[in-house]
Image (spheres, rainbow, N blue to C red):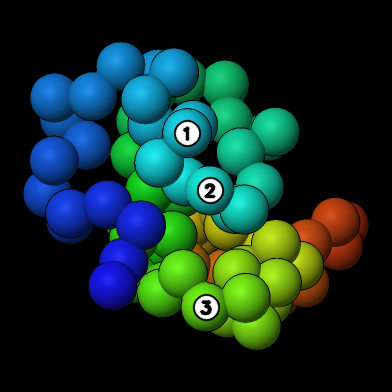
Amino acid sequence: PTLAPAGKSGDMSVRELRRACGAADTSWCVDKKELREVFRVAGGVCRAGECQSRLKGSCTKTLSCGHPCGGVRGEATCL
């Protein structure tokens, strides 16, 4: 199962989005649009411990082309 149903992020508050993103890094998000992007990435990750651990270490930023970075959290430059 995923963290939350995809497509529902538009109806959620900022607090709900942060909670629904689970282990994903949302510290860099400054607006709701960025939180929705993280929600989209985190929503595709199951709740298994190993998967959540990998999500926690992953960069959750979205590149200008619309694809998730897929790099390591905290790197100075995205892939």
Q: What element carries label 1?
A: helix
The residue positioned farthest toward the bottom in the image shown: 50
State which quarter of the image contains the C terminus.
bottom right
Nearer the camera: disc 3 or disc 2: 3
Residue 15 in view, yes or no: yes
In which quarter of the view is residue 14 placed? top left
Pointers 2 and 1 in contact (CB under 8 A)? yes
Q: Mark 1 points at which residue?
A: 19
N-term mark: 3 or 2: 2
Relative to 57, residue 28 above or below: above
Q: How far across and how far down the image is residue 53, in percent?
A: 70, 72
- Is residue 64 or residue 30 the one in the foreground? 30
Alpha-carbon neighbours of circle 1 within 10 Å: few (<14), some, or many (≥20)?
some
The location of residue 5, given as percent across then percent down, is: 17, 54
Q: Do the residues labelled 3 and 2 touch (CB within 8 Å)?
A: no
| Quadrant assignment for the N terminus | bottom left
Quick check: 77 left or right of 20? right
Residue under pointer 2: 22
Q: How crowded is mark 3: few (under 14 residues within 10 Å), some or many (20 or more)?
A: few
Residue with the mark numbered 3: 48
Residue beneath the point at 65% across and 83% down: 50
Amino acid type, residue under disc 3 in the picture: Ala
Q: Cα distance, mark 3 to mark 2?
A: 12 Å
In three-dimensional space, the C-alpha distance between marks 1 and 3, rounded to whole angstroms, equals: 17 Å
> Percent from the top left, x then y, of residue 15?
44, 18
Give the residue drawn at x 37%, y 25%.
Answer: 16
Which mark is first along the chain, 3 or 1? 1
